[in-house]
Amino acid sequence: MFDTGPSLGGGFGLMFTIIPILIVIVFVIVIVGIVTNGARYFKNARAPRQSAFARVVAKRMEVRNHTSHHSNSNGGMHPVNSARTYYYITLEFDDGSRKEYLDVKSLFGLVIEGDEGYAAVQGDWIVAFERERV
C-alpha cells in the first residue's frame, strides 16, 4: 500500500546489531576492570602489616601507556597520551621463597639489590624496608 522506497539492505541491519553488542562488551570490560582493581586495592589496604627479614633480589619498572581522545576548541578530537610507571621490588626470605611486591611508598630508589633488612609488607605491597646495619 505504501512504498517507503528502496530497502536499506542486510548490511545495515547487521551493523545495527553488531555495534551495540560491541559497545556493551567494551562497557562490561571497563566495569570489570574497575571493580577488579578496586577489589585488589581494598584487599591490600585491609591486609595485616607483616614484618620479616628479607633480602632485595630484584627491582623492576613497568610503564603503562594510556591514550584518550579529547575535543579541542575547534570541535575536533585530539589524542592525549599519558603514562604511569609502577615500581616492583622482589624479596627473598629466610626460607628461600621469593615474592614481588608493588612499591607504594617510593622505596625503589632507596634500596639496591643485595640489601638485607626487615621488610614490612601489606598484602601485595611493600610499605617499608629497614636496612640492617653491618
Image (cartoon, rainbow, N blue to C red):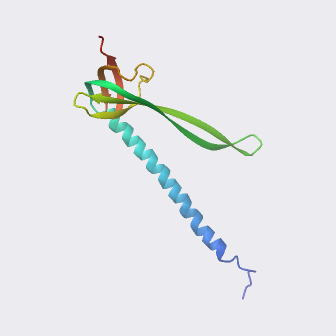
Residue 91 horizontal/vertical position (percent): 33, 29
Look at the image and tell me in which quarter the N terminus lies: bottom right
1 or 114, nearer to the observer: 114
Residue 19 horizontal/vertical position (percent): 59, 63
Residue for point 51% across, 54% down: 27
Look at the image and tell me in which quarter the C terminus lies: top left
The picture quadrant where one finds residue 94 is top left
102 or 122, nearer to the observer: 102
State whether residue 58 is above or below residue 110: below
Residue 91 falls left or right of residue 35: left
For the view shown, which residue lies furthest in the bottom direction? 1
Residue 67 falls left or right of residue 4: left
Residue 111 falls left or right of residue 18: left
Residue 53 falls left or right of residue 41: left
For the view shown, which residue lies furthest in the left direction? 95
For the view shown, which residue lies furthest in the right direction? 74
The picture quadrant where one finds residue 23 is bottom right
Residue 17 horizontal/vertical position (percent): 58, 69
Residue for point 57% across, 63% down: 20
Residue for point 43% across, 24% down: 108
Residue 48 horizontal/vertical position (percent): 27, 30
How many marks on residues?
Answer: 0
